[in-house]
Amino acid sequence: MTVTGGRLLVEALLAHGVDTVFAIPGVQLDWAVDALAEERDRIRMIVPCNEQSVSMMADGYARSSGRVGVCMAVPGPGLLHAMAGLATAFACCSRVLMIAGQIDSRQIGRRQGMLHEIDDQSSVLAAVTGWHVLVHAPGDIPGAIARAFAELQSGIARPVCVEIPPDVLAAILPETGGPQARAVRPAPVAPIAAPADEDLAQLVARLQQARTPMIVAGRGVARSPEARAALRRLAETLDAPVLMSEGGRGALPDSHPLALPTAAIASTLPLADAVLGLGTRFLGPPGTSRQMAQEAWLGLVNLEPAHLGPPRPVDFALCADAGAVAEALATRLAPRQAGPGQALSRRARDSLAARLATIRPQNDWLCALRAAMPQGATLVTDLTQTGYLANVCFPVESPGELIGPGYQGTLGCAFPTALGVAAGAQGRVVVSISGDGGFAYALQELATAARHDLAMIAIVFADGRYGNVERIQKREFGRSYGTELHNTDYAMLARAFGVDFALAGEPQDIAAILARWKVAPAPLLVVAPVGEMDSPWPAVIGRDVFALPPEPDAALTADAG
């Protein structure tokens, strides 16, 4: 068999357990795609309609399955389309590997106007990846892929990119004993230094003397089952409520008596006299530090040094793995008597539920979805009125059950991301929620869902406008401009792409729709016509709206600040 650079690439992906690649073929990738064709029984290629969906699907696949999401795009405009998904993956610490095409290696940097050329593409990639490399010779491909996988498992997960010029992919190498002989084994993952004993001793001493300790859990502690188990042991040892950021949703199951969703942070955190932030940026939506009682102590643990300093009023900062620190603290702290922390959490949940009930109809739709979706199902959210609320309060038991755009706020991401979830779902129910404006970004991917039989449910809340933009404009200027949409006939659109369609006139329709879908899972477009909705932002960022009721127990109120 002829061994090309493209063949080496596919062999390297297979050696690392890759079974799915999201890609759109193009001339700079031809030799890689031809090698994928030879291995179609071992590695499938899912082809969407737009390179933006290539990276978003890989992101959804990675965040839901726990495996690396691999995508490919041609250079220049192809890669630029994919940048939105890479930026989202960067914001959400997602393990995505982008294989990016390049122009001919002899032309790089010469500015001769080659097809798909953008000047210094590697520097462009640096903004949305944690590591990237430009491969100069075919023999370097296996090592580059091995290094990419090692980087994805080291420290904070960020997307990585391997750029390969077309002449490198097309280059023919002599036979060297078959794939096993040519494979480069996975590079060893650099171990993360264990927290120092003196640092742990300081944390133990401060947490032990706290009267109302609380934990704020972020993505850094939600990232693995081991870290989540350590968080649970620590919370139960301290009898400390666990407030989860958007990235940390599912770090502790919402059914746990100490668990509180993001929507409860602003009202509950000021009741703490000591706060331990684990793997969180500890920032509210405006980019300011989470608000605490003035005299409260704050300790932060994070692998990212930039998340340990101002504007946060940090009393103790530790650059370390949040899961390892949680495990060490759980074994060193003396157990507290259970009760006060759980009671505080219960009051916070009751207060939050009463407030959420006033935000309609978003909360009605979310309650209907939660009741109809089975345990283990995944909800993927977009920047839409219902999605804003879901990100901070939709009940989940694990991180893979709720996937959003993170701080990047990528409009239009939900549907293609959910297709990636469906590609790796292994029987899981997958639902995306979008507004009509966001869904329009990728509605052509209905063709992808049909072609690759990606069984999922796309729900579109159609109000004929960019609803949040319109609300802001009216608030700031007393009028709106450019916010109205001209929507398609969604039923006709679904038929045109060969997917099923359903209309949800009321939240209670969701149960029947999902029940029918479970009998014969297939791509399904659901449209919910809606009017103007209540603002979800009091639930997302409003502290005073969710102030807890007065507490007669002085031990719980003395440090409210």
Image (spheres, rainbow, N blue to C red):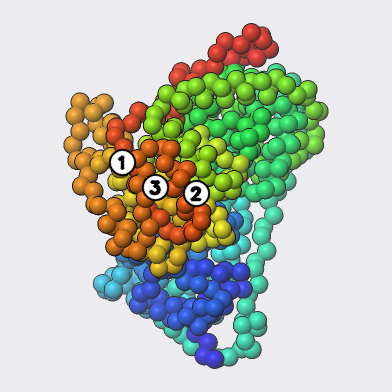
Residue 187: x %, y % from top left:
65, 66
Front label number (2 vs 1): 2
In the figure, 271 relative to 89: above or below? above
Q: Which amino acid, mark 2?
A: Ala
Which quadrant holds residue 84? Answer: bottom left
Q: Total label count?
A: 3
Q: Name which residue lies at 56% across and 64% down.
A: 148
| Mark 2 residue crowding within 10 angstroms, few (<14) / some (14–19) / many (20+) | few
Report if the CB atoms under discs 3 and 1 are less than 8 Å apart.
Answer: no
Please tell me which of labels 2 and 1 falls first in the chain.
2
The residue pinned by badge 2 equals 515
Q: Is the residue 283 above or below the residue 121 in the image? A: above
299 is higher (above) or lower (below) than 190: above
Give the CA distance from mark 2 to mark 3: 15 Å
Q: Nearer the viewer, residue 60 or 288?
A: 60
Question: At which x and y percent is residue 382?
Answer: 40, 45
Q: Amino acid at mark 1?
A: Pro
Cα–Cα span, label 3 and label 1? 10 Å
User: Is 96 left, or right, of 295 in this rendering?
Assistant: left
**SS class of the residue under badge 2?**
helix
Q: Which residue is mark 1?
A: 529
The circle drawn on residue 459 is 3
